[in-house]
Amino acid sequence: MVAVLVQGASRGLGLQFVRALAARDSVGAVVATCRQPEQADELRALPKVHVLPLDVTNEASVRAAAAQVSRSVAGLDLLINCSAMLHPSGRGETSLRDVSAEGLEKTFMTNTFGPLLVAKHFAPLLQKGSGALGVQSTDPKQKHASILVNMTAKVGSIGENILGGWYSYRMSKAALNMATKNLSIELGRGRNKVLCVGLHPGTVDTDLSRPYHKNVPKDQLFSTQKSVDCLLSIVDKLAVVDTGKVFVWSGDPLPF
């Protein structure tokens, strides 16, 4: 049976990933992490879901969560890093004069450093995954491949940037893409490979994007369910050759 972990699962895309994965017959256990499990009523009410505390801005918290998970599952087949923030103010910087060291630090801690620390401490569990996801490989010596997903954003693509602004968010997601590429190389070695990809969910009706909804055409503003359905369809089709890449919700690759 498949064991999965969703980091940043108390709301938005993370919560919907948990709902969708817990509903699958092939999934035996879903570990859902968030900063305040005692307030995550929706998570705790879902079947097959184990809710644990994890604060991506605190490495001791990440380490403790990994140790706790290792005592309950033999390995992980899928880990999705969902936690993200636009900026501590809730709005992206519109010009250079809005940039601050505090804003940069807090945004990078959540969007970049946190997911990398999660990868560091949970990689051993991913390397022990069951291989039940059926990742395609042409290597007959390969035992299996688990999957690490980092939720990224199209605005983090350097090649796609034509408007500027949003310094902290754009830079943090661009750096996350580099981390994903690095992870794909290191965790792609040996027999027990971990496939690492970035996924862009589109513009989704969540708290993060809500200040900008008025500028988004209705047919381009996705519900969390639609976005997650699209993203999981990508995950279900991944092959080892896809590791290190970033995909948009439609399945098209995103140059970064």
Image: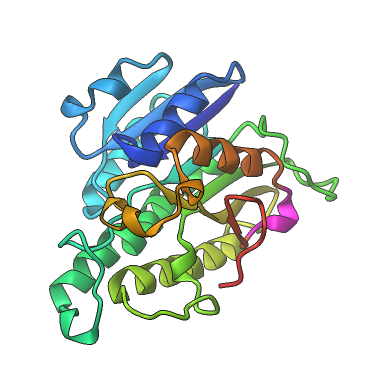
Q: Looking at the image, can residue 73 be seen?
A: no
Coordinates of residue 218 in the picture (x, y in percent) = 45, 47
Determine the residue positioned at 17% across, 27% down: 39
Coordinates of residue 71 in the picture (x, y in percent) = 38, 27
Coordinates of residue 217 in the picture (x, y in percent) = 45, 54
In magenta stretch: residue 105: no
Determine the residue positioned at 37% across, 74% down: 171
Instruction: Please tell me whether residue 81 is drawn above or below residue 256 in the rendered image.
Output: above
- Left or right position of 23 against 82: right
Determine the residue positioned at 29% across, 34% down: 10
Magenta span covers which residues? 239-243
| In-front residue for pair 249/177 | 249
Coordinates of residue 96 in the picture (x, y in percent) = 23, 86
If the image is split into quadrants, where does the C terminus sit? bottom right
Secondary structure mostly seen in magenta is helix
| In-front residue for pair 92/195 | 92
In magenta stretch: residue 240: yes
Query: Which color scheme does this rendered protein use?
Result: rainbow
